[in-house]
Image: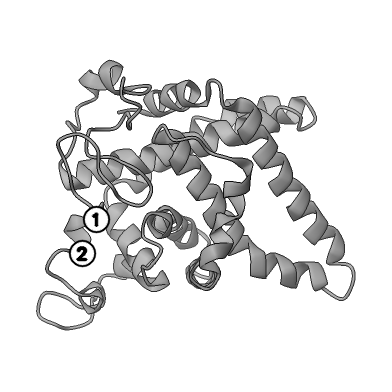
Amino acid sequence: MFAKDFRRSAWNMLSGNWVTFVLIEIIASVIASACAGASSFFGVGAIVSLIISGPLGLGMAICYLKLVRGERAEISNMFDGFKNFMSAFLLNLLNGLFIFLWSLLFIIPGIIKSYAYSMSTYILADNPSTDPNSARLQSIELMRGNKWRLFCLDLSFIGWYILGILTLGILFLWITPYHSAARAAFYLRILDEKNGNVNVNAQNFNQQAGFNNNGGSAFGSGYGTQNGAASGSANNSDPYPEFNSGRNDDEFTKGNDGEPPLNADDL
């Protein structure tokens, strides 16, 4: 599948859901603006932003995963991340810390790592009990060979963002949910590809785009609800079998011989 396929699929998914997701983005923007404005008062806003950005980002991920799986998302779902506050907070802190450290090496490594960690919030949304660092490491595994694909998807929205600037930001109310839905669809797709649930050739996209007749995911019959209940013939309660089957979390930080990894891509 190409960037245009994810964009088309995201557009189809948002049909009939635009009002809900535009409102979600407006509320998120108001919260972010309030934190920025409060920063002038002894940095209170910056502290509040650090505390809530993780849980709020997790809630947004939950909303968009509901959308791309054909489930009904409510505005209140954007605050569901606070139900898993500590994990969301620590994940956001870990990602930010590692990206900052990698950015010290002339910026580019930090950008690469931001893409490597980009699926960690979705992973935590699907597995609330997952350790934050494990979610980060699983994202690295999931994004191996896929960072460039996601970069191209992001880059394909540049025309939309230019239009958003020309409309003084008004169009961003539609661009942001459009882009976020495409990223969530990308997550489902690469996860199914890793698990072997779909044909990675894009020739079947016309059959996969949009929703199935039974309201399931457009990205293979192996997808079910957020809590992992699978639909169709792939009745697997764990959406991460290749990560969690027959291995423990320590293996994410060790090589095949039990030694710490030497590859910087594992950090």
Q: Is residue 179 above or below residue 111?
A: above
Task: Identify residue type, mark 2.
Answer: Asn
Residue reaching furthest bottom? 259
**Pointers 1 and 2 in contact (C-beta within 8 Å):** yes
Q: Position of residue 157 (x, y in %)?
A: 54, 30
Quadrant of the snapshot with the N terminus = top left
Q: Is residue 126 above or below residue 38?
A: above
| Left or right of 225, for residue 88 | right
Q: State the count of labels.
A: 2
Q: Quadrant of residue 49?
A: bottom right
The Cα–Cα distance between marks 1 and 2, rounded to whole angstroms, is: 6 Å
Residue, disc 2: 244
Quadrant of the snapshot with the C terminus = bottom left
Residue, disc 1: 240
Q: Residue at x 79, y 52 (%)?
A: 33
Give the secondary structure at mark 2.
helix
